[in-house]
Image (cartoon, grey):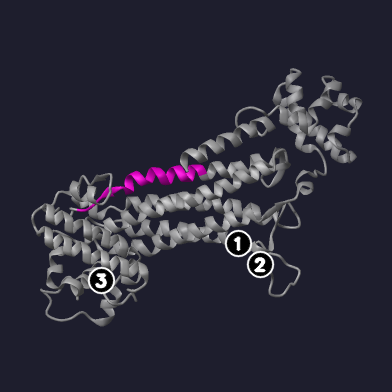
């Protein structure tokens, strides 16, 4: 039974009826719809529209339906009603008869769907935050486990300067921390009740009472905006997209590092896959999929942008199309977070590969800094060290293997103390400033990460 139809002379075309229906996907919101219905019944009773007895009857019947759904006793095929709101009212009608029709008083599906989505996103945002925290804990554990391990840092995918592996891993910790903070901040704009807005002009129920009944922090300021706003979903999907980009970057690193060319880490068999033709292969497939699924999440954001573009106020059925990409983005992000955490938990880092440098040209900046301390402008020092590196390459030598006479051929500023600048110990000691890659600095960063994780959950 539909919630409308009185002014229509003929039934809808079967194809169009199916085309208009949304139950196949908005059924995911059914528990939230029931919760909102229970709050609406209570608000109607507070306003004196229905009796306390009828309110209790409706709330009890809705709770029974909720329990039946959660237990699996009552299932949804996806074609038994136009949408989730109609389905719930039809089931309520079966339970208590025509009195179920009072639930439609002072109500529009326009506000209902906005309310359901906000309740749903409040829960899903917190679930995503917890998954991000789990991934951060794994990164932190790996950082603690590999204290002091040296690896090359890269720019342009070319070896640039040495860094500590924990420092590298914690770079992702802080990326995901920002993701978490974005989601937490967005919760403030999700946590606004649209209940009481009606179709667009508002209804004779106190919106603030309904907001309190549903656990929202506040209520809408404008009834038209309340039913037409999907900014909160755009913002949420933007957060999902940024988080997915971070996951994709980490996945790209795992893919590279697991290759024989890099060999920085090995994934256990539990999180790898084989080849259908080449028996020797062990592929980092979950990392590749995390990287690939990022496009789906970003696509969801773009899809909603295009849905909202030039859409007149207040409500149009175009907004029905916000849910499929939203649901897919949430599922994809959550599974990607779990997959990434599992990969890291099952990754074994190769210390020899990480710290085995064919030459020590990664310390070339140290030579330039040495000359700077001797009074040479850095621009000239940079050019001079470039020539020294070229000389060392031609001679097949490491920088530290050059004699003091060879150094002096380039500049009289070089003294025996230059060799103290060409060790990894000295390099890292000079980088024990806040946020640096020195051992002491990284230790402080680990402690700060623990505090942040403890504070933010």
- Relative depth, front residue between 245 and 206: 206
Residue 158 located left or right of residue 401 = left
* Extreme residue in the top direction: 375
The percent position of residue 255, horizontal first and vertical second, equals 66, 57
- x and y percent of residue 77 in the render? 34, 76
- In the image: residue 37, left or right of residue 371: left
Q: Report if residue 186 lies within the magenta region.
A: yes
Please say if the residues under marks 1 and 3 sit with CB atoms less than 8 Å apart. no
| Pointer 3 residue | 87
| Mark 3: secondary structure | helix
Query: Left or right of 136: which side holds 320?
Result: left
Residue 182: x %, y % from top left = 43, 44
Residue bounds of the magenta highlight: 177-195
SS class of the residue under badge 2? loop
Q: Residues within 10 Å of mark 3 (few under 14, many from 20)?
A: many
Figure quadrant of residue 428: top right
How crowded pointer 1 is (Cα within 10 Å; few <14, some 14-19, many 20+) is rated as many
Q: Residues within 10 Å of mark 2 (few under 14, many from 20)?
A: some
Q: Which residue is mark 2?
A: 273
């Amino acid at each position: 039974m539909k919630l409308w139809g009185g002014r229509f002379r003929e039934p809808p075309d079967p194809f169009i009826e199916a085309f208009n229906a949304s139950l196949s996907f908005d059924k995911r919101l059914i528990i939230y719809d029931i919760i909102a219905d229970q709050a609406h019944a209570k608000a109607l009773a507070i306003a004196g529209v229905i009796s306390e007895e009828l309110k209790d009857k409706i709330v009890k019947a809705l709770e029974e339906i909720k329990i039946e759904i959660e237990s699996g006793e009552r299932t949804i095929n996806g074609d038994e009603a136009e949408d989730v709101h109609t389905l719930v009212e039809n089931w309520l009608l079966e339970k208590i008869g025509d009195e179920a029709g009072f639930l439609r008083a002072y109500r529009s599906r326009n506000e209902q769907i906005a309310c359901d989505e906000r309740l749903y996103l409040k829960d899903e945002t917190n679930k995503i935050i917890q998954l991000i925290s789990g991934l951060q804990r794994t990164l932190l554990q790996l950082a603690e486990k590999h204290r002091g391990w040296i690896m090359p840092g890269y720019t342009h995918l070319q070896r640039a300067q040495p860094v500590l592996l924990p420092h590298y891993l914690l770079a992702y910790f802080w990326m995901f921390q920002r993701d978490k903070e974005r989601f937490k901040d967005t919760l403030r704009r999700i946590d606004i009740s649209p209940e009481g807005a009606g179709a667009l002009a508002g209804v004779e129920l106190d919106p603030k009472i309904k907001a309190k009944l549903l656990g929202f922090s506040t209520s809408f300021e404008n009834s038209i905006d309340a039913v037409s706003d999907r900014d909160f979903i755009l913002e949420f999907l933007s957060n999902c997209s940024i988080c997915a980009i971070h996951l994709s970057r980490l996945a790209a690193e795992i893919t590279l590092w697991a290759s024989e060319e890099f060999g920085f880490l090995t994934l256990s068999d539990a999180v790898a896959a084989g080849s259908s033709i080449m028996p020797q292969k062990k592929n980092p497939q979950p990392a590749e999929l995390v990287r690939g699924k990022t496009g789906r999440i970003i696509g969801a954001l773009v899809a909603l942008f295009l849905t909202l573009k030039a859409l007149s106020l207040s409500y149009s059925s175009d907004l029905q199309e916000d849910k499929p990409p939203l649901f897919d983005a949430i599922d994809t992000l959550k599974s990607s977070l779990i997959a990434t955490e599992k990969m890291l938990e099952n990754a074994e880092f190769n210390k020899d590969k990480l710290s085995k440098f064919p030459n020590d040209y990664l310390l070339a900046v140290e030579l330039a800094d040495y000359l700077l301390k001797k009074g040479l402008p850095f621009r000239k020092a940079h050019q001079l060290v470039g020539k020294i590196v070229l000389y060392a390459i031609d001679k097949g030598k490491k920088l530290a293997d050059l004699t003091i006479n060879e150094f002096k051929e380039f500049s009289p500023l070089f003294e025996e103390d230059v060799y103290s600048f060409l060790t990894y110990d000295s390099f890292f000691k000079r980088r024990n400033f806040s946020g640096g890659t020195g051992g002491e600095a990284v230790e402080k960063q680990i402690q700060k990460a623990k505090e942040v994780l403890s504070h933010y959950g």
